[in-house]
Image (cartoon, helix red, strand yellow):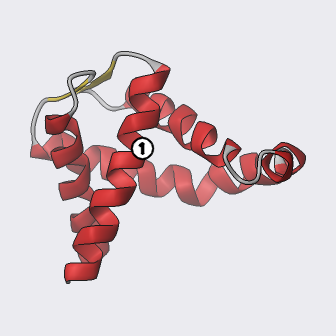
Amino acid sequence: MVEFLVLSVAVFISARLLDGVEIRSFMTALGVALGISLVNVIIKPILVILSLPVIILSLGLFILFINAALILLIDKFVDGLRIRSFSWALIFSLLISVISTGLNTLL
C-alpha cells in the first residue's frame, strides 16, 4: 500500500514539473498509479517477451519506449490526465521512476 501511495505522489509531482503533462488532481494521480500498476502486471510482461530480441539489441533501452507507450495507453483511459506527445510520455515515465525510487529509498 505504501508503494502505491509513493507511486501516486511520484505521478503527481512529475506531472506538476513537466509542461507537456497535465493532471487534474491527486485523485487523478491515484487513478494513474492504479493504471500503471495494472499495466505493469498484465500488459508489460507480454510486450517485453514479444520484443525481447529488440530489447537485447538495444541493450535494454527499448524498455523505455515500451514504458512511454504504456503511459500513453493510460492517458487514453484516465480522465484528467493529458500527455501532449510521445516524448513527453518518455520523460514522464523516466521522472516517475526517479522520483518513486528516491521516495521509496527515503521510506
Q: Kindly identify the residue that appears in the image at 58 percent across and 44 percent down.
A: 64
What kind of element bears circle 1? helix
Task: Tally the numbered discs.
Answer: 1
Q: Amino acid at mark 1?
A: Ser
Query: Is residue 107 shown above or below 30?
Result: below
**Residue drawn where x is 70% and y is 57% of the image:** 45
Q: Which residue is mark 1?
A: 93
Relative to 27, say whether 49 is above or below.
below
Q: Quadrant of residue 20?
A: top left
**Which residue lies at the image location 27% right of the left edge and 59% below the top edge?**
99
Residue 1 seen: no
Crowdedness near tag 1: few (<14), some (14–19) or many (≥20) residues, C-alpha within 10 Å: many
Q: Please say whether residue 94 is visible from this viewpoint.
A: yes
Q: Nearer the viewer, residue 61 or 51?
A: 61
Q: Is residue 24 left or right of residue 50?
A: left
Give the image location of residue 83, x and y in percent: 34, 22
* 58 and 52: which is toward the camera: 58
